[in-house]
Image (cartoon, rainbow, N blue to C red):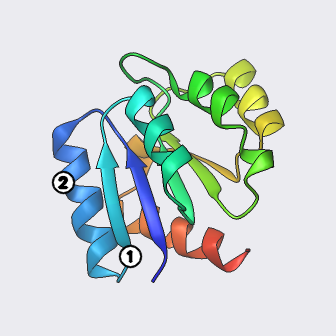
Amino acid sequence: MPKILVVEDYESLQKIYKTVLEQEGYETEVVNDGIAALDKAKKGAYDLILLDLLLPHMSGIEFLEAFEPKKHPATKVVVCSNFSNPKFNERADELGVSHHLMKSNLSPKEVVEVIAKTLKEM
């Protein structure tokens, strides 16, 4: 069973993503800030991290710089944020992000479909 870390600061989205991912058979953990995400990512072996960019305490980009996805090829990172900036997207790509999603444009089910596709690319 693939293991997913959801990094999202909105409680309602945390619950929605956790519910739909678990319904699809994924083991899912949720954290609400970048520091907690980094701690979990360094301790646990995740197949995928679903990452918001605008987070308390440590932004998604700061998380990516500290986690260094390219050094963790077994863990895919999908950015799912309402924040879109070409500079940040380019930096996220340099750091090894697999996909960028605009969460306001996608239903939770569509996010799960991208996650499934990304995991198959492994």
Q: Position of residue 105 (x, y in %)?
A: 43, 47
Q: Quadrant of residue 120?
A: bottom right
Q: Position of residue 73 (x, y in %)?
A: 76, 59
Find the residue positioned furthest to the front.
43
Residue 98 in the image: above or below residue 67? below
Q: Which residue is mark 2?
A: 15
Kind of residue at badge 1: Tyr
Q: Mark 2 and mark 1 in contact (Cβ < 8 Å)?
A: no
Kind of residue at badge 2: Lys
Q: CA distance from mark 1 to mark 2?
A: 14 Å
Q: Position of residue 77 (x, y in %)?
A: 61, 51
Q: Residue at x 42, y 44 (%)?
A: 103
Between residue 45 and residue 16, name the one nearer to us.
45
Of marks 1 and 2, the one in the foreground: 1
Between residue 62 and residue 13, name the one nearer to us.
62
Q: Position of residue 83 (x, y in %)?
A: 50, 26
Q: Secondary structure at mark 2?
A: helix
Q: Residue at x 52, y 53 (%)?
A: 49
**Looking at the figure, which quarter contains the C terminus?**
bottom right
Q: Secondary structure at mark 1?
A: loop
Residue 84 in the image: above or below residue 28? above
Q: Quadrant of residue 96?
A: top right
The mark that comes first in sequence, 1 or 2, is 2
Image position of 56 (left or right of 43): left
Q: Which residue is mark 1?
A: 26
Mark 1 crowdedness (10 Å alpha carbons): few <14, some 14-19, many ≥20: some
